[in-house]
Structure formats: C-alpha cells, structure tokens
Image (cartoon, coloured by chain):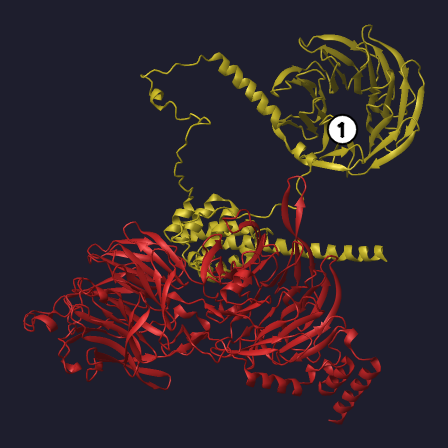
Chain colours: A red, B yellow
Amino acid sequence: MALRGGSFFADKQPSFSCDGRFLLVCTGCTVSVLSVATGLRVAELQGHTDRVTSIVVVKGLEEAKSVLTHAWTSSWDKTIRLWNFTTATQITVIDVGYKVVSMVREQHETLSSLYTTVIRKTEFRGYTGRVLLLHIASQKTVEGHLAKVCFLRSLFCFAKFSTFQTSLPRVLVASRKGSFVGMADSAKVWVWKVPAPSVGYCSEVQATVLHPWQPLTVMAFDPTETLVAAADRRGLITVWKNVGERTFYSSDYRRGKSDSGRADANDDAESRTTYHWHHKEVACLSFTADGSYLLSGGREAVFVMWHLETGNQRFLPRLGTPFRYITSAPDPSVFVLSMADNSLRFLNIGSMRMDRVIFGIKPYVTCPDTLEWLNVTKVALHHVHGTVAVPTANLIVQFYDVLLDKHANQVCQILKYNTVVTHVAFSVDASVMVTVDLRVAEAGVGGGSFLKFWTKSSEHIPYTLHTSVDSPHGGEVLALAYHPSKNIAVTCSRANDFKLWVQTKNESKDTHNWRCSATGSYKQKRMHAAAFSHDGTLLAVAAEELITLWNPLSNTLVCVLSIPGAFHEVVGMLSFVPKCPYLISASFGKQPQLTVWNLSTLSVWWSYQVEVEGITVDPNGGHFAVLASSHTKRYHKGGAEVKRNGTAQVCLFKPESPLPTSVWNFKDGIGGALLFLPPTEEVNKAINASSSESKLLILNKHREYVIFDPYSESNPKPASKIAANAAIEDGKLISFSIYLSLTLEPSFTALDTFNAMYLTTNTSKPIAQHDQLSKITSTQPWGDLLNAPSHVLPSLTDIGQQILESFLQKKAQ
Amino acid sequence: MEAASSYVPVGKKQLPKSRNPLTADSKFWRRFKRRIVDEQKFAVTCVDFCPVFPHDFVVTASTRVVVYDGASCQVKKTISRFTDLAYSGSFRPDGQLIMAGGETGLIQIFDANSRITLRQLKGHSRAVRWVRYSESDKLHVLSGSDDNSVRWWDVASEEAVVKFQEHTDYVRCGSYNPASPGIWVTGSYDHTVRMWDTRTAKSVSLLQHDKPLEDVLFFPSGSLLATAGGNMVKIWDVVAGKVLTVLGNHQKTVKKLKLTTPSESESRLLTASLDGLLKVFDIEDFKVVHAAKYPGPILAMDVSPSCTSLAVGTASGLLSVRQRKSVISEERATQALEVSGQEQKEVLRPSNFRYFLRGATEKASDDDYVLGSTKRALRQEHDWLLLKFRYKDALLAALNTKDPTVVVAVIEELVARKGLVQAFSNLEVGELEILLAFLTKHVASPKYSRLLVPAAHSVFDTCATSFAASQSLKQQVTKLKYAVEEEVRLQESLQSFQGMLQTLVQAAVH
C-alpha cells in the first residue's frame, strides 16, 4: 500500500458549497472537499481520469434541498460529471467529446445548459478552442459555436518559470445573477446573454464584444450586471459601464444618441474607466456582493480593494506570493485567495484580516537563471517529528507532515523577497537546524549566501535563530552537511573552499557560539558536494572531478579519489552507506556517472553512466536508492538545462552489487527528490505495512509525493495511484494525479536495460585500477595522462612508454 | 500564522563581534575620560599628585607652579615666585607643603594653602631639577642638581646635612626606598644609578644603566628597581645587582615611570616617553597591556594614589588630565544629592498642572494586573519612506543618519526589493555628492566593502552622465578615486609584507 499526497490547491479556481461549509478544490484528477472550519479534507471525488479543470456547484432553490450538495466538474478526459460531494458519489457522466478547459452554468434557470470552452483539435504548437453551449437535458451540444479561441503554447515558459508565472487560460465567467456569461480572450472581451432553454443554434445567442487596449488576463461581472471589469498584463484594470444595453435590451434606444464619451465607438458600452495601481500582471478580479468594490490581486502579491466611485484603494501588502484566484464565499465579507505558494487564505474584507490559512506543500524554489546549476536541498528529514523540511522562497522553511498530508509549521525569520532557502540540514537530535539562503543580487550588488544556525528553544516554537553568518565564503554556498554525532557543520562554496563550523561553549557566559574552525581547499577546485560518514570520522568533499576525504576532527586530508577517465565531469552528489564501507558519488557532465567506491580498497566498486537526480541512503544500512534518468541531461559548466518532462527511474541498489534490486518508472520524476523514511509506527500505520524496513518517499518536480515500502513483496501490484504530472498546451504546468497502476510495478524493461548496461559498461566491473588506467591512457591524448592523483597513477615505466609513444605519433603526423 | 505580515523595520546591520575583545586592562584604562586639556604656554616639566585625598595635583611649567583641585580639576592656586624656570614642584607626603627647585639652584618650600615661602634651601650652584621630601619623616629633603651633587637637607635649619658628590654628570632623578628608610637611589646623566644611605656620604652600591638616566623608581618591596634611560627601561634586582629584564618598547627616551595599583591584587608600571606614548606594563610578566598616544613628547606623568586620575604633561605645553568615569559620575551624584537636599519637597495642589499628571510614572506592584499596551513599532524616517516605496528618499534618509550600519541595511533592503538601481538613477547632483562622500569614507572598510564596492560600481554605471554636470561632483569622484587608490596601495604593501614574513617563517621552520 502506498500513500499519496502533496496536491496543488491553487491550480484551478475553487468553489464554495451553497451553505459555505465546504470548499471544493481541484487537486489533479480528483476534487477535494475541504471543510472550511477545520481546513481538513472531508471527501475526495474520484472518477475523472484526467485533470479536473473547473467546478460548478449547483445553486438550487431552497425547496430542492437534495440538489444543494451537487456539483458539476469538467475535465480533460472529455467528460463532464455531476457529483454529490457530501457522499462523494458520481451521479451523471456526460461525454462531451472534447477536452474541457472551462465550464460555467447559468444559474437561475432550470437545469438546462452549460457553457463550455473545449479544445477542438490540436495543431502544431497550438490548440484551437471553441466555446460551446451544451444542453444538459439532452446531453448534447447546441449546434455551432459561440466563439473560437486560440491557445498558444509558449514552449519556453516551462523550465525557467514556475507554474504561476505563465499565462492564465481563458476561462469562462458567469455573472452572479446568471444573465450573462463572459470570457476574456487575449484581444477582446466576449459577453453573451443567457438564451432561452429552447435555443436551437449558437448563432441565436446574443453577444457583444468589447475591445481593450492590451491583451487581457482576467475579467469579472459586477452583481448588478451593468459593469464588466477586465485586467491586462500591464496591471491596468478597465471597467466598462452598461455593457450590452444596445445589443441586449433596447435595440433602438441608444441608436440615435451620439457616441461622444465612448472610448470606442464600436463597443457596446456607455463608458470606460481605467484603474491603475498594479505594475505587474493582474491575475484575478472580483466584485464584492454589493458591487461597490472591486478586488484585484496580481503578481506583486498585493491585494487591492478599489472603491469604484471614488477610485480609493485599500491594500493588503506583504502577502509573499503571487495571486492565482479570488473566490467569493456565500458570506459576502469573506473571499478565498488562492496563492501561488499553494495556500488558500480566507480574507475578511471588512477587517482586512486573514481568518484562516490552509497551507499545502510549498512549491520548489526557483533559483535565478544565473544560478541554475546550484544543487539545492530539495527535502530534508526532521528525525524527531518525522516531518519533512521543505526549503522555499521568501526565507521560509516549511515543515510538512507527509503522513497526514498536512502543513505542520514553518520557520520564517522575516518575509524577504528575492531570497530563497537553498540548503537545510539538521543535527541528529534535531536540536540544531542549519540553513543556507541565497539573496539575489541586483545589478551585482548585495547578492550572496547567508548561513544561519537555528536552535530549538521550546516545543511550540519550531526554531529560533541563533547565529547568522553573512557571506560565509567568497562565493555562493554549494553544499551543506551536518556531522552525525557532533555539532559540526560543513559548507562548500563556489570560492573553491570548504569550511567547518563548530559549536563552541563560552565558559564565562554559558552560551554556545558557532565559529568557523577550519577551512580547506584542494588544488583550487570548486567544491560541489560534501558528506559525513555515519560514524563521523570521515568527511568527503567533492572537488570538481575528484573526491577528497578528510578527517573532520583533525582537519587533515586523508585521501583523494579520482574517477578513472572522468576529467571533465563534476561530482555533484556524495553519500556514505551506513554499516558498510561504501561511498556513492554522482557526477555530471558529458558522461554523467553513478559510482560506488569501496573505501576499504579505495577503488571503484562499480559504476553506471546515468544521470542521477537524487541519492538517498537507507539509514538501516545495506541499501540505497537513486533517482536516475537514462537520458543524458544537457550540461554546460555554469548552467544545466533541465528536461521539461521526462520519466525517471527509481532504482534500489545494494552497494555490493551493480544489479538493482528493484526499478520503478516514475513519471515526471526529473527534477524530483527521494528520501528514506525511518520505519516508525506512524509510517507503518499510514501505509498499512508492518515491516521494520525503511520506507521510501519520492517527490516529483511539483512536490506531489508517494510513500511506499520498497522492500515489500506485495509492492509489484499495488492498488494505489501514483502522483504524476503532465504539461499542457496553454503554456503552463498543471499538476494532476492519475491512476497508473503500471508505474509502480517494477519496470522489468528498465531492469533489463540495467542488466544490459552492466554487461556493456566496462567500468561497472570491480576491476583492478592498473588495467583500468592503462586502458584509459591508451585512448586519451597524452595531456590527460598525468591528470590524476599520484597514488592512482600507474607505474612510471608504463606512463613513460605512453608519453614517448604519444610524442612519436606527433612526429609521425 | 503567516498571513499579511506587518512591516518589519529596517534596523541597523548587525556585524559580527570582534574576535579580540578588549582585555580587562584595556577596558579599565579606556574608562579614563578626558577631563581637562589645558594649553600651557611652556612645556610641562613635572606633575605630582598629593598623597592625601582629594589628591590635588601640582603642575610645574615655566616659572610657575600651579595647584589643581583633585576632584574638579580646576586651578586652585598659582605660585609664581620664581625668578627663573621652576622645576620639580611636589607635595610633602602630608600635602601641607609644596616645594620646587629652580634654574637658579634655589629650592623653595611653600605653604600649600597660603603660598607663603617658608624656607629657601641655598647651596646648589646650578639648576636643581629634582627635589623630593623624605617619606619617613617630614623634616628632610633630597635634591639632585646639575652641579653633579646630591644633597640631603634638613629643612628646619635650611642646611645641607650630607652632600653626595660621586656622580660625574647632571643628577636628574631619584627614588626613595619604601622598605628601608634612609635608603635612596639617584640616577645621573653619567649612566649610573647610585644607592645612598643618608647616614654616610658614600654610595652604597652602583648600577650601570648605559644611558643617561631620566627616572628611577623603587618597587614597594624595596628589592626591585626600575630605571629609565634612553629608550630602555631596566628592571633590577637591587640585592643581587642584576638586570632582571629590559623593556625596549618605546621608540624614544623614556621620561617618567610610575607604579600604580588599579585593583587590590595587581599593580601596573606606567612608562611615558618622548615618542608620545604612555604604556602600561603588567609587572608580573612585563608585557604591555595597554598603550595610549598623546599629541607630543611626554615630559611629565603621574597617577593619583587612588588610581582615578591620570595627568600627563607634554613638551608642547599640553596638560591632559583624565579621570575614570565612575569618579565623575559619583561626583555628579554627590552634587545632585547636595542640591536635592536643599530643596523642599513640593506638595502638589489642584492649582498645579502637574497635579493632574500625577501617578503617570507609578510602578505596578506585584499583585497588580497590568494591562498590556500596544507598542507601536519604532520606525525611522527611512522606514516610512520605504513603506511608501520612495526608495531614493529612503536612501537619502539613511545617508543623513551618518551611520554606516543603517545605510548598509537600507541598501540591502533596496536590493531585496530590486529598487537600488532605481534609487541611484533618481539621485540629483547634490544628493549624489552625499552618497559619494559616504562611499569615499566607507568603501575601504572591510566590514562594508563587500556590499559597497559593487554599489560604487553601480553608482558609476548609472550616474556617470551627471558627473560631468557639476564641478563639485568631479571633486567627489576624484576623492573617491584617491580613497580607493590609497586602499589598493595599502593592500599591496600588506601583501609584500606578508610575502616577506612568509619567507622568514619558512626559514625559521626549516
């Protein structure tokens, strides 16, 4: 049995139930019903086979009480479904035949028709959409279409920006009374009047079009249905007054009047007013229930409340993350803000205070473009609480309870923008937390890493800041590790050195201080990774293509390991396997390698040519797991290009043997992370296991995760689902979960591949170094001959011959 | 829970504490705060504290001997009955009399209160540079003169009882042995220190210092002797007649020695030299524990017996008196006490406005329930401006505080908001000058250079066009250039110095 969690709440607009007690949220392929009072998940609507795109709660009359718990959902699986969300049962399925992007239902009529935006057909690098009218009673679409929409996919938005920064899809908006349905297209605002149920053709539906100045992002109707507001990418909000008077009501009333005062003579609106405060894209707009205020929120993370008559603004600043949606609750004073950091915030606009905040797991930090090569800590295990520490933007470290799929608490020093936490490490008893945060420079000023030591002072406050070191190295900190038994931390930096930080006791004041006790470097090589052995007597620091072993207590260099044949690769990950003398290293470059070293013989035990995304070691010893992608990642020194969407393999190895014990395919695993959880009672209970072996936690790049027992025999045929992701046409990433029983099965094909690789890779065999090197020297130009530490070089006679031969070749040419 | 968090004021940038915090000695001597700095017209040749509380002190300069009040450091009396330069004005151990030698060879003894000349000791043919009262009785005086003789005077009869004539050059200093009465040492320009017993006319022993002696001083035990001559101070074991240690810490002639006891357990040796330095030695290991620099060659120095005041006189005529802070505050407290004692406690009546304000300063007793008051966050001017997104004004407000820690914190905040370049580019010419002046002052400071050097680059990138507009801006830029060049020179010389040291260390190791 596997446990799944980590859904993204703020992906689609949520919807309140009629009584306001529940909030329906799209979470991938399912719809989660959250209790407003507690913030916990009450039910989950499972049935869609692709991601859910919109939710419409049925707002019936008082007498039709049974209907009050019904909701329509639309999905990418080309169906529209009706649910009873209190019992989590499915009532109706309507097959539309097209992927549904957005759906609204006119509210005040009897159950008759639904407007949907659907994707009609796909074209090269783009999709054409249609706005259709669906007749529910007959379950058929009305002939024709209301509008054509073009979804352009911007290919290059994926890797560089996180999900919320890309363009928003065109969504349909219904007015509150239900007379109008609108849509903000990129260049125009469509407004349709809801037709009589008997309409036969879409062309009979009355429509009007407004033309804004700029491509729009979002629109909203006011409750009196006289105003239409729309906002654009520049942050300008335009409000049209008396929209559609000419078209919909009195066809000849206005015709005789002059069009003076109109912004655009072609638009059917009396006047146009603009409001400008946002300097970045506006993501959401909403009117209050009385129609006198307009609410807006955008990328600059400030909530603005406009008084429409005077243009006065009220602000709610310092929210920390961009907005996604504003949803009105049945209570007119409450609005739900869906924020990009995966939180739902219940805002009372009377007091301008947050009533409640529901946090999901926070998304990964996005490093600035110039620092993409930075190997950040993705997750770290808090050994005492069993929670997972998630470093995020704005100087926040979130502690997430993966078993309950619940936000536990967070550590935040000061909300600071343009600062991301890149590394987190804990002492074994979790009394000390060490973080590294990275401040992004502006025009080269003020950037750099900050090392912080936190201590646990009481049960209720997670951690308090103890020591802060500004710019501990000359360059950015690349790696952080904590000693398994002593209070020693090590940081590696871009400035070609590493530093040991120790806690010293000040006898006179009975306080503890953190001081840098030692600094080391090796041949002016950049140090990318560091790891302590589990008994704490050895420190491994990666110095570009070499691995240096140090004694952390005496600060002396013990030994240098070099990967045979790898001169241009960079070792980026290091890990010791407890209870056995093995060290695992993963290098990146033209020929990425996973290497297992036997430290008793100081030789390569076996290796693979694979790109490794993450390594985790079973704390019980004996096994380690690797998140590997068989495709090579394009790599430049200074910047790695991450593949957008790829399946990775999770391989479980015994260090003695190069044959993986198990292999699983993991969709969208590239950019993910994995972690062994100790087999505590809670973990076993959560996944219905009883074994005393460690459990594996895998996160994909959107921080959806799955926990399972990698050693379990029953695992090959799990009845579970696995979190997975896909990208979608309109240029943004959307998380969703699907049932893929196959993905957790051992990938026999992949296992075969590994077997084949094992047989074909020369370096995989534990062979004598001498042979290995003589093979290399014969293939490499002579310049690389001596590019290895002296203790692994072959004998002088061998080298001498090689060098002379290479000279002879030169002459011969 | 994190919701809309409130604005966090931009405080001062916290810098790591120094790794070498002040030693107890440095802290002690730094507590001496400047009390008076008096510009005399002529060199101050001698300063002497009265052993009796309140430790008045007498300053000899030119033809005058001035008595200062020990507590307030105000001039108490001036004795100017000298026909030529006066030397070595000092108190009798009970503080009742003051005596002074002079250029004429005459030694005069005055009443400390009435300034009447009580006795005149005549006999020296040349200038008397050093005179001291006997500490065991109040009846005798020892004097050293430029006529190479040392005389032991009976004050009452104005006669020289014993005449020591073994020195062959000027006698400029001497010291009384506190352990055995009647034993004195004198130091002379003939490079020797001679020990005298006042009962015989011959010297008891002789120590060869090898430099003209400027000061000699017995330690309280009476067995150790410090002698100052040239730039050396030698510590002698008098009984064995051997040098224990030589202190060569001064660059120029050491003029004055003084032993003092800052605390019960430890005593310190103070040396003052013509190189303008006052150094404090621990007498256990004779290591320098503190040093202070004065603006001129020090000729005279003395510390009050309670170690609360330190008086220094220089060749340029500067008299500097420093007092420990606690002494000053105590004095103020006593003054305040006196004042308040005189005042009657006023009874408040409703006719008085303060009647309606009474109780505002009342402290809550233990069983009172205290209602918490909402504390308003303390916001500086730059905080208010940052709240309004007025980045340039916030930067200027920070610059106006003249506190580099504040400026650095505001610059960091602007970087976090991505508003620094904007702030720089909006600066007017006059404002740019303030910024450049700040950069000139602090760009080389290692605490801030990591941030300020790139910031200076950024200023040059964004504002280079406006430099040409103003002459004063050009000057500022030139100043900044000089500051940077100076720092580069310093770093280069430090590096070459380091290189030299490394070779030396390497040579020493092998």
SS for tag 1? Answer: loop
Regarding residue B132, the answer to whether it shows in the image is yes
Q: Quadrant location of residue B323? A: top right
Name the one closer to the observer, A676 or A667: A676
Left or right of A1? Residue B389 is left
Name the one closer to the observer, B481 or A706: A706
Left or right of A43? Residue B343 is right
Label 1 environment density (alpha carbons within 10 Å; few <14, some 14–19, many ≥20): some
The disc numbered 1 marks a residue on which chain?
B
Furthest residue toward bottom: A812
Q: Is residue B440 above or below residue A657?
A: above
Q: Quadrant location of residue B466? A: bottom left
| Residue B186: x %, y % from top left | 86, 23
Q: Quadrant location of residue B37? A: top right
- Disc 1 marks which residue? B267
Name the one closer to the observer, A266 or A576: A576
| Residue A215: x %, y % from top left | 29, 72
**Residue at x-position 55% and y-position 61%:** A681
Regarding residue A210, the answer to whether it shows in the image is no
Furthest residue toward front: A690
